[in-house]
Image (spheres, coloured by chain):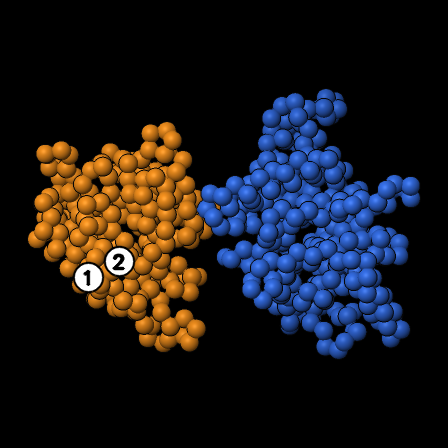
Chain colours: A blue, B orange
């Protein structure tokens, strides 16, 4: 009987669930992984590039990371076609806000708008929900650097570090042990949780966050060797004048970070 | 336009423990007459034409009473709505002024609000603290150190041109405002017996004095 409630997105099943929405969330758990990490001086987002065929012409622009406005960017996990609609919506919202108030939109306001749009598709008939989850990275004057995650149901939440997409559970558990753990000596990153200092999370700097992001992707990509072609690193930081700098790292830069992570894990394995 | 008149004044005072980069934290003084009159009739003399927009901002509005009340409420309630729907987050004075200007410009092509506005506010995040924006019903908006609108501007602007000084104290600023009021009462054809003066500083908006209590309305 449960199947009776599968086709309709807007009808609760007898167990009180919306199956289509749950399936959409499930679909994202098989999509290319994205990890976001908040740093002291910026935000890092790293995404897995899924290479479907060697014959496919390489994309001219990023298919995972999209700039929304001068102070916000998102990464996508799920259906890119659906994501484009939502990204248009976010850009429009940011532009209209700037036009109305002559000031940059607060990040949470932008995220909330996109999520309200997504939510509508779980409530009105005849439409399927968006099969997309986002990580939003942004900066505003009131709350500084921020990282948000959203899912097809229209829920969103703010994080210090989080993972969406395939194997996000494994990625999250790695972040839980490694994010904000104080290092006593360099190269000794495998510290067990110290109950005395465990509560106080110290934000990493941008370089540390990049390395951690690569580490997480290494884990979620199931033993596949990380390479600049397979992952995309994005950083957001401020320049001397306080302007937001968005950067997608090129092959050489991300290659260097991958090499550093490899050296780190190797030396940790030796001891 | 009606003969409501607004004039405003910004002043700075030195902070007790001054920080080297921002020695001045400015505050804002707003003043308007309290008259509601049309043609040869005087309806009221105890109006408050300075609308509170948020805890740290307000705008003085002049124009026919209908547009004046309608516009003040439209703007102040929309800004309140913004606060409610953004978890208590307040717009900066700059954003409030631009929103207000936008609404004036939007209304211009469909039967405009016949109001001129002087909007002032205090932002902890802005280095200078207080700021003042002068706009007219056509939708032009300028950031200024002082401004006056309506017939009153013919009397008041010259006084403020001469007396306004960077870094003056609150007392000095209020003295200039009162000088303007005396000049109006001495030389202006139209009788404006009552004026209301409000101050915005880091503590927020407060009414300094009024000629007749607006609460009697």
Residue at 72% x, 73% y is A183
Residues at discs 1 and 2 both on one chain = yes
* Residue to which mark 1 is pinned: B176
| Residue nearest the viewer, comparing A222 with B158 | B158
Counting labels gives 2
Whole-number angstrom distance, CA of label 1 to CA of label 2: 8 Å
* Location of residue A56 (image quadrant): top right
Q: Are marks 1 and 2 in contact (CB under 8 Å)?
A: yes
In this picture, is A183 found above or below A149? below
For the N terminus of chain A, the quadrant is top right
- Decide: few, some or many residues near mark 2? Use Cα within 10 Å; few <14, some 14-19, many ≥20: many
In the drawing, does residue B23 fall left or right of residue B207?
right
Q: Earlier in the sequence, mark 1 or mark 2?
A: 2
| Residue A251 rendering spot, x and y as whole percentages | 81, 58
* Location of residue B209 (image quadrant): bottom left
Subunit under mark 2: B
Disc 2 element: strand
| Residue B44 rendering spot, x and y as whole percentages | 13, 39
Subunit under mark 1: B
In the drawing, does residue B116 fall left or right of residue A270?
left
| Residue nearest the viewer, comparing B76 with B60 | B60
In this picture, is A212 found above or below B187? below
The circle on residue B9 is 2
| Residue A209 rendering spot, x and y as whole percentages | 71, 63
| Residue nearest the viewer, comparing A47 with B32 | B32
Residue at 78% x, 62% y is A253
Q: Residue furthest bottom?
A: A185
């Amino acid at each position: 009987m449960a199947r009776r409630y599968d086709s309709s997105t807007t009808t609760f099943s007898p167990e009180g669930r919306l199956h289509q929405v749950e399936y959409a969330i499930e679909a994202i758990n098989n999509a290319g992984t994205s990890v976001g990490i908040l740093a002291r001086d910026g935000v890092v987002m790293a995404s897995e590039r899924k290479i479907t065929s060697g014959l496919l012409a390489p994309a001219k622009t990023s298919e995972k990371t999209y700039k929304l406005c001068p102070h916000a960017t998102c990464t996508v996990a799920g259906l890119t076609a659906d994501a484009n609609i939502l990204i248009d919506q976010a850009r429009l919202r940011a532009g209209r806000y700037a036009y109305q108030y002559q000031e940059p939109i607060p990040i949470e306001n932008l995220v909330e708008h996109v999520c309200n749009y997504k939510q509508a598709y779980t409530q009105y008939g005849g439409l399927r929900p968006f099969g997309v989850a986002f990580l939003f990275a942004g900066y505003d004057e009131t709350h500084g650097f921020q990282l948000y995650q959203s899912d097809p149901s229209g829920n969103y939440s703010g994080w210090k570090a989080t993972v969406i997409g395939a194997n996000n559970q494994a990625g999250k558990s790695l972040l839980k042990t490694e994010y904000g753990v104080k290092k006593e000596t360099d190269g000794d990153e495998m510290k067990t949780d110290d109950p005395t200092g465990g509560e106080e999370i110290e934000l990493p700097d941008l370089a540390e966050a990049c390395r951690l992001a690569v580490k997480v992707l290494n884990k979620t990509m199931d033993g596949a060797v990380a390479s600049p072609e397979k992952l995309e690193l994005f950083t957001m930081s401020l320049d001397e004048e306080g302007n937001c700098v968005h950067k997608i790292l090129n092959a050489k830069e991300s290659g260097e970070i991958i090499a550093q992570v490899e050296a780190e894990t190797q030396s940790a394995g030796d001891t | 336009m009606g003969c409501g008149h607004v004039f405003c004044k910004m002043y700075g005072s030195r902070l007790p423990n001054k920080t080297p980069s921002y020695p001045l934290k400015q505050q804002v003084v707003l003043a308007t007459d309290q008259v509601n009159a049309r043609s040869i009739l005087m309806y009221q003399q105890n109006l408050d034409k300075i609308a509170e927009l948020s805890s740290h901002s307000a705008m003085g509005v002049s124009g026919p009473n209908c547009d004046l009340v309608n516009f003040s409420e439209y703007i102040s309630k929309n800004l309140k709505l913004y606060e409610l729907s953004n978890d208590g987050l307040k717009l900066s004075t700059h954003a409030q002024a631009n929103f207000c200007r936008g609404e004036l410009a939007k209304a211009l092509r469909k039967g405009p609000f016949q109001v001129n506005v002087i909007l002032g506010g205090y932002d902890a995040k802005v280095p200078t603290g207080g700021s003042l924006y002068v706009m007219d019903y056509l939708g032009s908006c300028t950031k200024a150190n002082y401004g006056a609108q309506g017939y009153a501007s013919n009397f008041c602007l010259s006084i403020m041109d001469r007396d306004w000084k960077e870094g003056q104290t609150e007392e000095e600023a209020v003295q200039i405002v009162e000088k303007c009021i005396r000049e109006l009462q001495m030389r202006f054809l139209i009788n404006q017996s009552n004026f209301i003066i409000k101050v915005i500083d880091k503590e927020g908006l407060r009414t300094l004095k009024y000629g007749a209590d607006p609460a009697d309305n």
